[in-house]
Structure formats: C-alpha cells, structure tokens
Amino acid sequence: MRNTGTVYQSKDRWYTGNFVRFFRDTIQPIGGWTKRTLTGATIIGVPNAALAFTAVTGSTPVPARYVAVGTSRGYLYVVNTDTNVVTDITPAAPGGPATTNAGSFVVGRPYRITSSGTTNFTLIGAADSNVGTTFTATGVGSGSGTAQDDTEAVWQLASFGRYLIAAQGSRYFGTTTFDYNYLYVWKGDVAADCVRCDTAATAGGGISDDPYAVNGCVVTPERFLFALCGATPNSVTYPPTWVP
C-alpha cells in the first residue's frame, strides 16, 4: 500500500484501505475476535478491569507478558499471553468475597447464599434458600447457613515498571469499613499472591506506612504512585518512601 504521494503517483497500486490486510500477496479482510483457550485457574466473577504488562522474576529474569484481570467477585488473576495459563494472585487479605454466618448479616448489604444449613433465607429477603441465590439482607438471620458478600468489587490496575499495582475499590464506600482498601503489588512470581504494599516493605523496597481506604491508583510516567483515597473526601495520597 503506497499513500506517500498522490493517487496518480500510486497508479496500479493500493493507495488506501480500511479493515483489510495483505496476506500471501493478496488483500484480505482483517479477522475478527477469537476466543483464547485458557488453562490453569478458573476466572470467577465478571472481569471489570484488565491491564497488559510485562513482568520478570527469578535469578535470571526472563520477561513474560501478562494480562491482569480483576473481577466483580473480588478475585485477581494474571494470564500469561504466551502460554494462556491463568494464575490466581488474589491477595490473601482481602481475598475473595467474605463469607458471613447467619446471625451476622448486615441489613441492606447484598449476599449470595453459599450453604443453606438450617437458615430460612426467605425470612431475610431471599426468594428461596438455594445455594447461589442472591439477596439483600433485611435481617441478621439465624441458623447454620452462610452467604458471601455479593457487593461488586471494582479493581484499579496500574504498572510500576514491571510490577503490577492493584487497588480494590471500596465495597463499603461511605462507611468506616476499609478491609479491602489498600495498595497491593505483584512482582511477577506466579508462586506468590499479590501482597499488600506494606507487607512487601518487610521484604525490602515497600511502603512502610501505606495509605488505606484506597479506591484507585495512578502511576505517572515519572513513576510517582498516587493512591486515590476515600477515607477523607477528595483526598490524594502518594507514598514517597517506596523505592522498589
């Protein structure tokens, strides 16, 4: 395809095109989306955040290309785009959705039933007591049943060099519960989970006093990491002591 000159100068050649490609010296339409066949961990929940990045690990680092995927159920995964292997790197805390026993449900919070036990979930807002049924609690419940928090988790992902930075937006924004709201880092080791940045500090090169109530994160081209926090309205925090 030659379009550096005029149409007349490109006589007997392709001058412009749209949604086409050249393959084996012939012009063909560009192919559509194709589904990848993934192996490894099963992705639980609806992906609502994704980030392509390159990571290295080991004594003789070899770059590996990944796509990080955060889901509505609070899980975090990395997909090796060369091998199509999915690895669950969800932080141990908060981990996936929290499980609550009957008697401790919070009124007004959405849940998904994980075990019926002796609990009559229809008395506290559910259509039935079947495993998998979602409901908004109208009471604390009683009996031996359990349910998982079904509030949608929203991930914010960024790359700090070859480190993955993740923040799980507050599931309880506007309350005093910030169990999920810290900065997390993954350094490329598929045998290790994503860890809270102050945990990484104990192993060297982390944040000694990391911010909490984090609802988002941004890494600038100059490699300043900003944590967008919700504990104080409209506040922005950056950890100046973190030198990975």
Image (cartoon, rainbow, N blue to C red):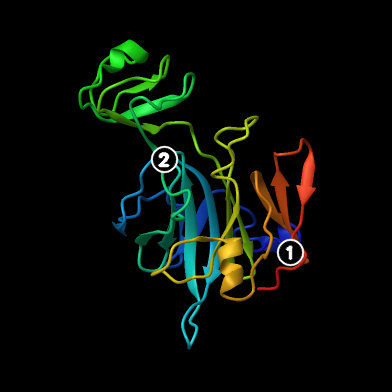
Q: Measure the C-alpha gap from mark 2 to mark 1.
A: 56 Å
Mark 1 residue element:
loop
What residue is shown with label 2?
A: 97
How packed is label 1: few (under 14 Cα within 10 Å), some, or many (20 or more)?
few
> Circle 1 sits on which residue?
4
When the figure is inspected, residue 45 is found, relative to residue 131, above or below; the finding is below
Q: Which residue is drawn at 46% across and 67% down?
A: 25
Spot the residue most to the left: 118
Relative vertical location of residue 180 with respect to residue 20 in this rendering, above or below: above
Q: Is mark 2 on a helix, strand or loop?
A: loop
Q: Which of 4 and 244 is in front in this view?
A: 244
Q: Quadrant of the C terminus?
A: bottom right
Across and down, in percent, residue 212 comes to 65, 48
Asked whether the viewer can see residue 162, the reply is no
Residue at x 70%, y 73% (from the top left corner): 243
Side of 135 relative to 129 (left or right): right
What type is the residue that disc 1 sits on? Answer: Thr
Which amino acid, by three-letter code, is at mark 2? Answer: Pro
Q: Can residue 244 be seen in this view?
A: yes
Q: Which of marks 2 and 1 is in front?
A: 2
Q: Which residue is drawn at 48% across and 59% down?
A: 67
